[in-house]
Amino acid sequence: MQASLKFDTLYHVGEIDHRIFGGFAEHLGRCIYEGIYDPESPHANIDGFRMDVVDALKRLRMPIMRYPGGNFVSCYDWKEGIGPRSHRPAHPDFAWKSIEPNTFGTDEFMKWCELAHTAPMMAINLGTKGAEEAAALLEYCNMPTGTYWADKRAEHGHKEPYGVKLWCLGNEMDGPWQAGHVPAEEYARRADQAGKIMRGLDDTIELVACGSSARGMATYLTYDRITLEYCWDSVSYVSAHRYSQNHRNDTAWFLAEGVEIDRIIDDYAGLFAYVRGMKRSDKEVHLSFDEWNVWYKNHEADGKWQKAPHLLEEVYNLEDALVCAQYLNAFIRRADVVKVACIAQIVNVIAPLLTTKDGLLIQTNYYPFQLMAEHSSGRSLTPSLACPLYHAGDRGETPILDVSATLNDQNELAVFVVNRSQTESVTLDIAFQDASIVRISGVDTLHGSDPKAANTWENPHLLVPHTGAARIDGNGAKVELPPLSFTALRGAVTPR
Ligand code: AHR
């Protein structure tokens, strides 16, 4: 099959924000305990942090890390996770029916972030707590010494403020499962009160208001609109969450998931424009897609009051990786709307990494993330794609390819393509109206014939990227896209 992809260097939607390559670490299952922090592992450093996990995450170049939840945060008392470990109480965690030992808390997280070359994106508890606790946490993290909580931080070994820039005002407050779930009107007041005080203490911070936890919620967009109207002046972002599912076991349908992701981003772009219009405002509000991934195979959410139970340990196969690539393609394509995004999560819990005491398994969805985080830079080009359609069940006729591309000031080009076809290879011609592609500097392809194939402890390298096939062709390039594939092509262009 043939397809054609055209660009013009002048047609783009603006610079991509690298915070779309963020991660998410929640006190849930074996994410923090055993995944990030495991003093008993042979891979632990002196602080008990798993260095094999840190090294694998560093290769994903995550500029931000959302923490400590998730549903967990809505019952969390951050004050129990600071100070000498011997004074920290263990408590039952309502969200995941587990025991929270509090041996890892804010200071450990900050230290770990430094090690992992990432920056904290902190969530506050707006379920069972409120503005006062949030202000105290802000003081602990961001204020210079000379006040009670800032002095506590210094006492705990960190005199300088941590300078946390990005703060989430609660988590999924639209969801009845959430501790402290309230209707939008009430959440909006809570969020606005907390946000005003936090920004009053530190006006360099940016705030994320909770949006809907899924498109299927009855209050989808209404919850978001009410919240945004109320909090317009204090927030910079509204959050969206999505977990893709293939319960119907229909690969063709599932691989059209990108269509749905695009719709969500469009929905929010419309909402932001609407509220801005109603407010007669010039302000820009953007989307923080701060939980996204595939998640439907493992729903074990009951920790049976254990510490670090095995929860949500999803195994990712090839089709899942191709869906994950489509999330990132959509975030790049809509760089004008999506400024922050976090894959949920990073290790052991719905994550690209799985650990045993002494082992690390890299799952399929790690690789598109790694390639895109490493190679995308600069402006998000507007793609003109002509390609065959395929039938994606009740999602209808869907383009066989899903693409995004970036071009930076050094004229370095990166093109990312998912071939959704299960049977057809595609030869893709890439060209610019106003430039020539003069060099191909690399092409990596993750592909396989079985959409359900996954890396396992026995066969950990079954699905890894291999060098793909591409060549310069006149002023453009030709790249071969095998069926069921993700390809990352890098090159250089010169203006014509
Ligand atoms: O990421 C797992 C859970 O999914 C999070 O705790 C919650 O925010 C979402 O429902």
Image: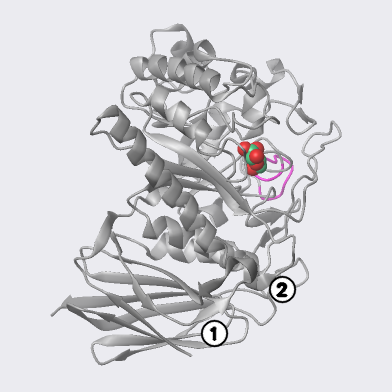
Picture colour scheme: one colour
Q: Can residue 9 be seen in this view?
A: yes
Q: Where is residue 476 in the image (x, y as percent from the top left)?
A: 28, 86
SS of the residue under disc 1: loop
Give the distance between the C-alpha atoms of the residues marked 2 and 1, in whole angstroms: 16 Å
SS of the residue under disc 2: loop
Of residue 262 and residue 478, the one placed in the foreground of this image is 262
Residue 101, picture quadrant: top right
Q: Can residue 139 be seen in this view?
A: no
Which label is found at residue 407? none
Q: Name the residue under label 2.
A: 453
Q: Where is residue 107 in the image (x, y as percent from the top left)?
A: 54, 27
Crowdedness near tag 1: few (<14), some (14–19) or many (≥20) residues, C-alpha within 10 Å: many
- What's the residue at 47%, 47% (across, down)? 341
Q: Mark 1 points at which residue?
A: 482
Q: Where is residue 58 in the image (x, y as percent from the top left)?
A: 50, 53
Q: Which amino acid does label 2 sit on?
A: Ala
Q: Where is residue 174 in the image (x, y as percent from the top left)?
A: 60, 31
Task: Reply yes or no: does residue 39 show up in magenta.
Answer: yes
Q: What stretch is highlighted in magenta?
A: 34-43
Please determine whether, in this image, residue 9 is positioned above or below residue 400.
above
Left/right placement of residue 386 relative to residue 432 reads right
Crowdedness near tag 2: few (<14), some (14–19) or many (≥20) residues, C-alpha within 10 Å: some
- What's the residue at 54%, 25% (across, down)? 184
Of residue 316 and residue 183, the one placed in the foreground of this image is 183
